[in-house]
Image (cartoon, rainbow, N blue to C red):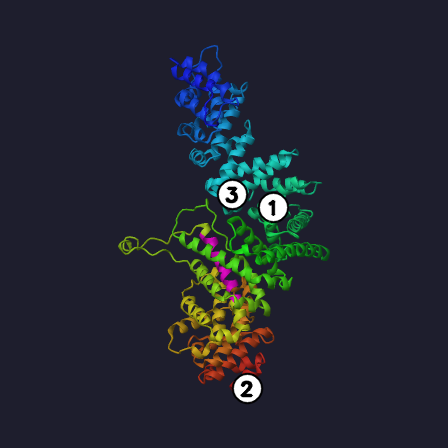
Amino acid sequence: MSGEVSEPIKKCSLILKNAKSDTEKFAALFMVTKLIKGKDCNEAGKRMLFESIGFEFLRKLLTSKDVPDDCPASVYQSVALSILSCFCEDEQLATHQDMLDSIPVFLGIVSTCDDDEYDDNLIIINEAYHCLQSISLYESGRMALRRHDVITKMAQIYTQRSFQIDEALTLIVTLVARFGANSWEADPKLFHALLQRVSLDFETDHAERKFELAEMISALLFHCRRDLVARTVQGEIWPECLYKGISDILKSKIGKAQRDPALKLAANAVDVLGIEWTLHDAENPKKFFLLLLQLAAIEVRMQMDNKSFNQCVQQADLITACFIILEMSINFMSTDQLDLDQKDKQQVYTGLKGAFSAVLSVLVKLANDTKKDRLQKTEKAFAYAMVRVLTAWLAQETSAMKNQVAKVLPFLFKLANESFYESRDYRIAHKADNVDDHEQQPPADILRVMLPAICHLVVEEEARQIFLKEKEEQVLYDCLLFHWSIAHYKKPPVPRAERLKRMNEPDPELTPQQLDDMKDSRTAIVSLCNILMNITVLEAKLVEESALFAQLLRFIFENLPELKDIPDNLVMHGHLAVLGLLLLKQQASKIKKNDFSICRYIQTTIRFLWDAYNIDESNDPQALVVSLQYKEHWFEIMELWFLGMQTMSGIIKLIPWISEFAIESGWAEGIVDTLRKVKIGTLPPNVKLAYEDFLSQLVDANPAVAPVLKKADALKVCRNHRMMDLGKKLFGD
């Protein structure tokens, strides 16, 4: 039976216990080394021998320098390690406290493996590594290895090209897979040094080890501090080594065993370094980019075409890696930074359409599967990955595969909404944490990635009706509130008892992660505003009667005036302001004149519209120009400004008393004053139309406006810029 101890082991155990001196005990150990490696030595036998020897005696052998003159210095260590490496194969012994306490001894041996005393007995180092690796198989062992800073020590061994560096790298990968990005210090020097050494080996090794290293580097990149590495990689040469190594593989005749690790490594490299990493070849930068994109698209099609969801999940790691390449490539191509000719574009489109047809077919099958509401964690993660990459494609190819998309759209919303609420609740729960914890990845927020695609989808009648049927506007409102809480950062309130003491304290400096989160949330709010604007314009009746949209308008009234007037907030401010105008126009009948929050909102919105153009910042004192503050973002807000002016004109017609703000603020007079200085014939027609329409509506809405405009010399403005309609209203025929 497995629990019974053989007679030879019982006999050896008795000898060890009865040994009268260390010399007698040491002699008995040679019998132990033979027994422990025999087939008859089961777990119970190993534990009996372990207890009979006593760990103190083994520790003494490991650390003692007091050896006979005719005995090699390492012989005691060799015997002890030979026994310990066998004991480590048993979990109870590998995680025994005495074994864990000996980790520094094992580290000492592998760290000094270049010393002369080990030249003739390299098996000692091998067995010390074996002990460390056996310990790393178990949770308590991994925790102990982390406490002893094993990752740093192994990284130093690898970068110094010491003996058995592959064992050191294996230990690092095992531990970073458990502890994630928290494995690394805030100083990225060691990580860069390690990646440099491993990447150079990967580039220059053309044997089977090249593909083993590809998997190791993938793990290191996947579990690194991505933001930190991306910020500090400038000047490092390991990205180029990776590029050359992966390029060599993918351009060769290879099979699945070689292609898969290369694609996974390329995906992790792109994820950390950005898609620009694929453009290393100065002579033909798009060549490798297109090759990688096509290979990823083909792989997705091969792995998903005519396959069930369960079959695809079996290859989730590979498929998800290809998804990363596809998503980042699509986003990069949308910026038009890559010079693709018509042939390139056609090949890319064909490849992507084939890949996404396969993705859609699997999603349709899953949406119709009764198991869709009972997905396991890994299955849900893969479903999220499919939604994420598909919506990245739909954000650019809005008319692609409409019928298939419509079939699966309710399911996409369901998955995206689940991921949003899960991610939101997690981030709220951890908001108070001051620790920069990289160990646990926060849940994915697929809705956040889906927003640009939703913006295009709601323009289509069928997709918009599905959106409304699923009550998606409520989810987007919750999403807006959440991202506002991040973008409009407020320092935590100070307890009353500490207020006096901390009154003059400066605001705490925001961490890079907080700044990145704020930037992402501002972008999310812009996308949310665009979606809600489309709904407001296309579903006017619904918005007019909707309690939710009334609540949204109230939120904008109360919160927009509080937004900090800084350049980073300009685009978000403009979108919220114009969304508010569109909602205000639809719900004009419900607006009360004595509502102070509306007054503050209108004043804030006037400021956004007023500040866009001036002549003060022009080189030519007679030229109207976009203000410097707006110029950097004008591409994003130009159409928004014109829509804002047009909507403001419409609101004045419906709510005449709002015209009072245009007079009291000096805006109406300011427009005329500015246009009076603009050279004849230089006023852009669309700007002229926006201002003329607005001023005309003001004149119609409020009798007090005309005298103000006339006093500002509106006659000259009407003549110079041929504002015929405004001239008729002010001065008659």
Question: Is residue 67 highlighted in magenta?
Answer: no
Circle on res. 145:
none
Question: Is residue 518 highlighted in magenta?
Answer: yes
Numbered range of the magenta stretch? 514-531
Is residue 15 visible in the rendered structure shown here? Answer: yes
Q: Nearer the viewer, residue 596 or 633?
A: 596
Q: To which quarter of the image does residue 57 belong? A: top left
Q: CA distance from mark 3 to mark 2?
A: 70 Å
Q: Position of residue 541 (x, y in %)?
A: 51, 76
Q: Which residue is mark 1?
A: 318
Identity, as a three-letter code, of the amino acid under mark 1: Leu
Identify whether 93 is placed above or below 192.
Answer: above
- What residue lies at 48% left-to-right and 71% top-to-bottom? 610
Q: To which quarter of the image does residue 351 belong? A: bottom right
Q: Which residue is mark 2?
A: 728
At label 2, counting other C-alpha atoms closer than 10 Å, the crowd grade (few under 14, some 14-19, many 20 or more) is few
Question: Marks 2 and 1: CB-CB under 8 Å?
Answer: no
Identify whether 720 is placed above or below 626.
Answer: below
Identity, as a three-letter code, of the amino acid under mark 2: Lys
Question: Marks 3 and 2: CB-CB under 8 Å?
Answer: no
Looking at marks 3 and 1 on the same chain, the residue that comes earlier in the sequence is marked by: 3
